[in-house]
Each structure stands twice: as structure tokens, then as C-alpha cells.
Image: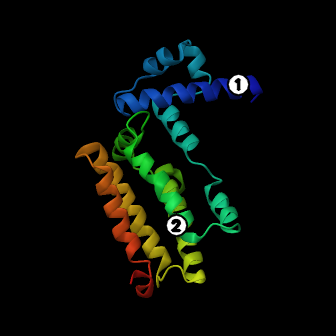
């Protein structure tokens, strides 16, 4: 794919992302994406064959493969594991609270209609990557004495299930910033050794 084609594809994905954020997944048509991009149907079909194809590309675009490497690199610097975990959770909180250009509803609509397994499921891949990041942060915190945890992967998985639940709650029943802080702190308090709590 030439540079012009790469740029055109990126443009389509950026515009489509907004469409999916506004309408969810199931109500979006190829015409909606054509209209948002102000291109011909043929122009869109050069890159994508269906709304599902576009949506999966948007999701793949969302997943930053370098997240794990960035955390590992950051941990080799001066930041503590606690600082890095706080930064990670701050980003998760921003995503939970994001009102505009949020793909949560579209993502859950798509995966409730299309059961993809294993490596074919970008939502699961994103979740698993986040679990690995949190697990590494917890392990580093345990090594430095900052955290106490006998099961870092279990704790990481639990924390990410809480985050996913908060994402759904924010779009269905509503959740306040204070409630997000309270739920995340509840999980994190279990990591702090008793002698540091007093």
C-alpha cells in the first residue's frame, strides 16, 4: 500500500470511528461512512468490504501494541511501580469518563452479535494486554517492597474486570468520577502492605 493509500485508509478509519461512537455498531451502514468521509461508495469499497470490516479495523487501530513495551521502558527509569500503576489507571479512568468519540457501546454491541474467539477477538486481546501490563507493574511493586501480592496475575485480572465493568456502567446506569475512584482504590488498597497502611 502506497503512502497516499495509507493516508486515505487512516482518514476513513478516523471518520468511521466518529460514526461508530455516535451510532453504535448495529445502526451504522456503509452509506453513513461514505457520507462522513465524503467519498464515493467505490472509494470506500477499495479499502473495506463491510461495516464489520471497517469496525474491526477501527478497533485494531485502537490497540497500541507498544503499551507493554512502554511500561517496561518506563519501569527501567525513576518511576515507581505505584506511580506507573496510577498513571495506567488514570488513562483507564479517562476512557471510562469519555463522553465523545467513545467506542464502548459499539464495541459491546459488536461482540454481543459476533462471537469471535481467541486471537480473532481484539477486545479480548486488548484486555489480555492490559492484564499483562498491570501484572508486570504489580510484580515490580512486589520486588521493590511497594506492594504485597501473592497472585499478581489474579489481582491484575480482577482489576481489569473492575475497569471493564465500570466502562459498561458508565454507558448504562451512569457512574460518577467519585465512584470510579472508590472502586479502583478498593482494589488497590489490597496491594499495599499492612505496615504501609498504618
Mark 1, residues whose alpha carbon is within 10 Å: few (<14), some, or many (≥20)?
A: few
**Could you tell me residue 73's position as x and y percent?**
70, 63
Nearer the observer: mark 1 or 2; the answer is: 2
Seen in the image, is 176 located left or right of residue 11?
left
SS class, disc 2: helix
Give the residue number, with chain letter if any, for mark 1: 5
- Name the outermost residue toward the front: 198
Q: Residue at x 36, y 45 (%)?
A: 108
- Name the outermost residue toward the right: 2
Residue 50 visible in the displayed image:
no
**Could you tell me residue 158's position as x and y percent?**
39, 69
Q: Height in image: 55 above or below 96?
A: above
Of the pair 57 and 119, the residue shown nearer to us:
57
Q: Height in image: 126 above or below 83?
A: above
SS class, disc 1: helix
Give the residue number, with chain letter if any, for mark 2: 134
**Could you tell me residue 133's position as x and y percent?**
56, 64
Amino acid at each position: 500500500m502506497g503512502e497516499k493509500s495509507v493516508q486515505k485508509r487512516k482518514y476513513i478509519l478516523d471518520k468511521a470511528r466518529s460514526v461508530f461512537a455516535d451510532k453504535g455498531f448495529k445502526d451504522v451502514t456503509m452509506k453513513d461512512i461514505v457520507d462522513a468521509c465524503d467519498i464515493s461508495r467505490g472509494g470506500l469499497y477499495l479499502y473495506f468490504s463491510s461495516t464489520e470490516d471497517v469496525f474491526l479495523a477501527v478497533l485494531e487501530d485502537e490497540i497500541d501494541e507498544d503499551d507493554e513495551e512502554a511500561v517496561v521502558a518506563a519501569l527501567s527509569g525513576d518511576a515507581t511501580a505505584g506511580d506507573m500503576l496510577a498513571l495506567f489507571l488514570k488513562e483507564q479512568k479517562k476512557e471510562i469518563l469519555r463522553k465523545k468519540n467513545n467506542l464502548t457501546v459499539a464495541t459491546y454491541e459488536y461482540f454481543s452479535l459476533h462471537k469471535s474467539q481467541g486471537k480473532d477477538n481484539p477486545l479480548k486481546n486488548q484486555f489480555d494486554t492490559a492484564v499483562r501490563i498491570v501484572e508486570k507493574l504489580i510484580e515490580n511493586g512486589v520486588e521493590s517492597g511497594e506492594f504485597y501480592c501473592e497472585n499478581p496475575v489474579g489481582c491484575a485480572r480482577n482489576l481489569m474486570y473492575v475497569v471493564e465493568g465500570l466502562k459498561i456502567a458508565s454507558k448504562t446506569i451512569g457512574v460518577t468520577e467519585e465512584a470510579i475512584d472508590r472502586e479502583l482504590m478498593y482494589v488497590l488498597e489490597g496491594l499495599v502492605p499492612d505496615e504501609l497502611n498504618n
